[in-house]
């Protein structure tokens, strides 16, 4: 078994808005590290999601990789996000959705039991 650790780093301009989105709407809970410049959420025992604040003059156009977020009920989460006005796109695969966070960073919601 691998002991590798993975980090998903997402550059954001409005850290407060993104913190609230990931903590509350996506249900990641309280961050394991929280400052005015960086917020870290532990996704599981091998992965960390990091939001890094971009300051004026920094390039915020870096391509953020589309990462996968596995949940028990992806359809319910996609409906919740849609009710808050977030863009949701159903993909060909059942219960799989492409979403955008408050700063249009992409991620995929899918069922945690899908391999």
Image: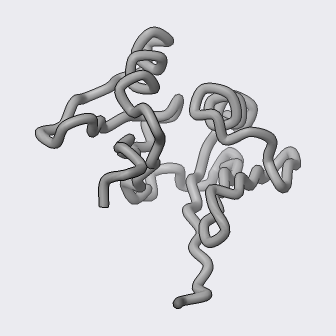
Q: Residue at x 61, y 87 (%)?
A: 3
Above or below, 60 relative to 89: below
43 or 111, which is in the foreground? 111
Label count reads: 0
Q: Quadrant of residue 24?
A: top right
The picture places residue 103, in percent across and down from the top left corner, at 51, 34
Farthest residue to the front: give it: 113
Q: Is residue 21 left or right of residue 85?
A: right
Above or below, 48 relative to 72: below
Q: Residue at x 44, y 43 (%)?
A: 105
Q: Residue at x 43, y 32 (%)?
A: 73
58 or 31, which is in the foreground? 31
Image coloring type: one colour
Above or below, 82 relative to 67: above
The picture places residue 111, in percent across and down from the top left corner, at 36, 44
The picture places residue 38, in percent across and down from the top left corner, at 77, 53
Q: Is residue 67 left or right of residue 95?
A: right
68 or 13, which is in the foreground? 68
């Amino acid at each position: 078994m691998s002991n590798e650790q993975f980090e998903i780093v997402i550059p954001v301009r409005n850290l407060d808005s993104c913190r609230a989105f990931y903590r509350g709407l996506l249900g990641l809970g309280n961050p394991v590290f929280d400052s005015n410049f960086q917020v870290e959420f532990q996704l599981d025992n091998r992965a960390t999601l990091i939001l890094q604040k971009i300051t004026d003059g920094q390039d915020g156009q870096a391509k953020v990789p589309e990462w996968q977020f596995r949940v028990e009920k992806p359809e319910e989460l996609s409906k919740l996000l849609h009710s808050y006005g977030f863009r949701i796109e159903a993909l060909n695969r059942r219960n799989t959705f492409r979403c955008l966070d408050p700063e249009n960073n992409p991620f995929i919601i899918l069922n945690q039991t899908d391999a």
